[in-house]
Image (cartoon, rainbow, N blue to C red):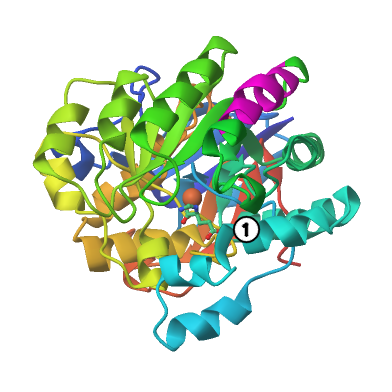
Amino acid sequence: MKKLFINIKELIQIRDASISKVSGAEMGILPTIKNAFLLIENDLILDFGKMSTLSKNEVDELIDCQGKMIVPTWCDSHTHIVYAGNREGEFSDKIKGLSYEEIAKKGGGILNSAKKLRETTEDELYNQASKRIEEIIEFGTGAVEIKSGYGLTVDTEVKMLRVIKKLQLNFPIKIKATFLGAHAFPLKYQNDKKAYIDLIINEMLPKIAKEKLADFVDVFCEKGYFTVKQTDRILQAAKSYGLIPKIHVNQFNSIGGVKIGVKNESLSVDHLEVITNEDIEALKNHSTMPVALPSCSFFLGIPYTPARKIIDANLPLALASDYNPGSTPSGNMNFVVSTACIKMKMTPEEAINAATINGAYAMDIQQTHGSITIGKKASFNITKEIPSYTFIPYSFGNNLIENTYLNGKLMKFKD
Ligand code: NIG
Ligand code: FE
């Protein structure tokens, strides 16, 4: 089945297959073709170029994109979208002035979600997460990473990962799974933290590895959560089971998590709202992708990741949503891209690169996603009629995506 998209006002993020991420000044360059065509066959990109170079083609479907642009689907490399219920009660507490840490101390936070999740059946959890998957596809996301971490027992962590597996089987969006048993210490282990880490290492990890339920491992390395030493121990154990680290670091404090992430060859280090010069140095000359989560900063009212400092140090940067019930109840990557421009002073080119090719790298799917490249998945968004791609971050709060194709198929949510 061949589909030909013609008269594309601008075809955005065209890349050679050899490009796996962009760093530093390269992030400011977004390669495009004006007045372009795009040819796909089944689930893959077959060809693209200027309309003037289009040769006669026998196709099954012809789609005229006059006035519209095509951009690869967003690659959201950090979410927690499998969760039970919501935490809007904490929202009111937050408005009244309580901090994220104070809400957690009051019995809210991650442990609140863990309690709700334990009381929710696997089917119900799946139904709730399915709605969020549909929602993010509507916002133009074509690949997403999803973490466990609201179970915090062997059975409930496995329950979450099974839900992710079922989502992988039933939805056309590309999904990568991360085991985040080290998200918080359950109440019963507050006075014996070593015992919970032993449980993660001796019981959770072997079971998850045996059932092949996760690609990555994550730890919330932060004051009051997991220390650098505990993080190191968990990452090393997880690596011995073939799980690749992707960790939460520097959300509130810089305690050495970046260094330990890099030492353990983490695919990404995420959050980085607080980042020291030492952290920047640690990231240089390594393959670890720094990931910023501006919607989380927006919602919690905490500092934004200093993107300029990171990019100007010649490092790469990816953008993700962090969609979760506590710190970011939104998976809208259009808003993430806008916020990165408005609040983090990233240029539209940098933000789009960060949310596509660099996001794909942060999920280890850069071979198949993140750019318009011959042989990659035909997963892209067709915009409404817009004057320029800058209009995407500029018109914040709007969804300018008219249609989304995942693996060559038109998503029908909009009808
Ligand atoms: O990335 N910081 C840790 N984890 C999530 C929040 C989890 C929650 O509050 O439920 C985050 O912000
Ligand atoms: Fe997170």
Q: Quadrant of residue 197?
A: top right
Q: Is residue 250 magenta?
A: no
Residue at the limit of the structure toward the front, as seen here = 191
Q: What residue appears at the point 54 percent right and 51 percent down from the top-left corner? A: 381
Looking at the picture, does residue 340 appear above or below residue 310?
Answer: below
Residue 122 located left or right of residue 65: right
Q: Crowdedness of circle 1 by 10 Å Cα count: few (<14), some, many (20+)?
A: many
Image check: 195 left or right of 312? right
Task: Work out whether 7 lies above or below 91.
Answer: above
Screen quadrant of the C terminus: bottom right
Residue denoted by label 1 = 111
Q: In this orientation, does residue 26 appear? A: yes
Magenta span covers which residues? 197-209
Dominant secondary-structure state across the stretch colored magenta: helix
- Res 281 quadrant in image: top left
Q: Residue furthest bottom?
A: 96
Q: What residue lies at 31% left-to-right and 27% top-to-bottom? A: 260
Amino acid type, mark 1: Leu
Q: Position of residue 96 (x, y in %)?
A: 44, 89
Number of marks present in the image shown = 1
Mark 1 element type: helix
Q: Can residue 267 be seen here?
A: no
Name the spot of residue 395 as percent of width and height, x first. 37, 74
Q: In this orientation, which residue lies closer to the viewer: 394 or 382?
A: 394
Q: Closer to the camera, 57 or 371?
A: 371
* Residue at figure coordinates x 58%, y 68% from the top left: 108
- Is 205 in the magenta? yes
The spot of residue 412 in percent (x, y) is 75, 57
